[in-house]
Image: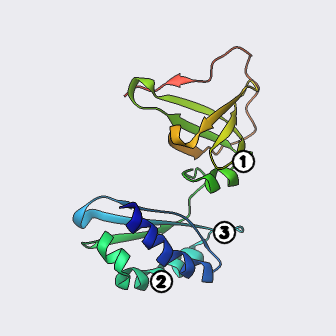
């Protein structure tokens, strides 16, 4: 499946680049007649409805005729073109590098070993990132340990500093 997704990315990315848009992420959700191809686009100045419309109109014909698309999307599907949003998923090293300085939520592990971390994304490189907790402590996290990560949009003024010694790690129930 990954090879077919990579081929689909290769077909869609240049079309979006011609429109001055970046392919942020691409995913296929669902199965059979309920498949959704979600194409997340971005650009430096942000995404508006005109950009989403232009992207949809440009990539739809590509998807109808591209061998990678037709082999991956065997039945009818819904095309969803969207921005990654304020609370955007972080899946690739590039996503993490773009989010340096942002507040993030990260889940590592599964079941009883699952941990959620919340803090400022301090640095990111090709193998992982440093997360700075509210108490100023830094933790190195490898991408291979991440189950789910996203930026966190904080409404209103920045929260007040918490008293030192409070743990920010929290077990996640299965």
Residue nearest the observer in this picture, 93 or 131? 93
Work out whether 162 lies above or below 86: above
For mark 3, what is the residue?
43
Residue placed at 68% from the left, 48% from the top? 125
Residue 57, which numbered label? 2
Query: Could you give the CA–CA distance between mark 3 and mark 1, rounded to whole angstroms?
Result: 17 Å
Q: Where on the picture, by quarter, is residue 63?
A: bottom left
The quarter in which the C terminus is drawn is: top left
For mark 1, what is the residue?
100
Work out whether 98 lies above or below 136: below
- Camera-near label (3 vs 1) is 1
SS under mark 2: helix
- Relative horizontal placement of residue 107, taking residue 173 as reference (left or right): right
- Mark 3 crowd level (few <14, some 14–19, many ≥20, 10 Å Cα): some
* Residue 62 in the image, given as x and y percentages of width and height: 43, 83
Dot 3 and dot 1 residues touching (CB under 8 Å): no
| Of pointers 3 and 2, the one earlier in the residue sequence | 3
* Residue 170 in the image, given as x and y percentages of width and height: 53, 23
| Of pointers 3 and 1, the one earlier in the residue sequence | 3
Residue nearest the observer in this picture, 137 or 82? 137
């Amino acid at each position: 499946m990954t090879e077919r997704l990579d081929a689909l990315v290769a077909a869609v990315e240049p079309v979006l680049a011609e429109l001055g848009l970046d392919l942020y992420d691409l995913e296929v959700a669902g199965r059979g007649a309920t498949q959704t191809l979600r194409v997340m686009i971005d650009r430096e100045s942000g995404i508006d409805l005109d950009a989403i419309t232009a992207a949809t109109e440009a990539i739809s014909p590509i998807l109808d005729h591209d061998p990678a698309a037709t082999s991956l999307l065997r039945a009818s599907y819904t095309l969803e073109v969207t921005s990654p949003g304020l609370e955007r998923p972080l899946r690739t090293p590039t996503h993490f590098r773009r989010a340096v300085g942002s507040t993030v939520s990260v889940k590592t592990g599964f079941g009883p070993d699952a941990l959620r971390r919340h803090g400022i994304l301090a640095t990111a490189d090709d193998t992982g990132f440093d997360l700075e907790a509210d108490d100023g402590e830094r933790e190195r996290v490898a991408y291979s340990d991440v189950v789910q990560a996203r930026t966190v949009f904080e409404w209103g003024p920045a929260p007040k500093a918490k008293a030192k010694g409070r743990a920010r790690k929290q077990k996640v129930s299965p």
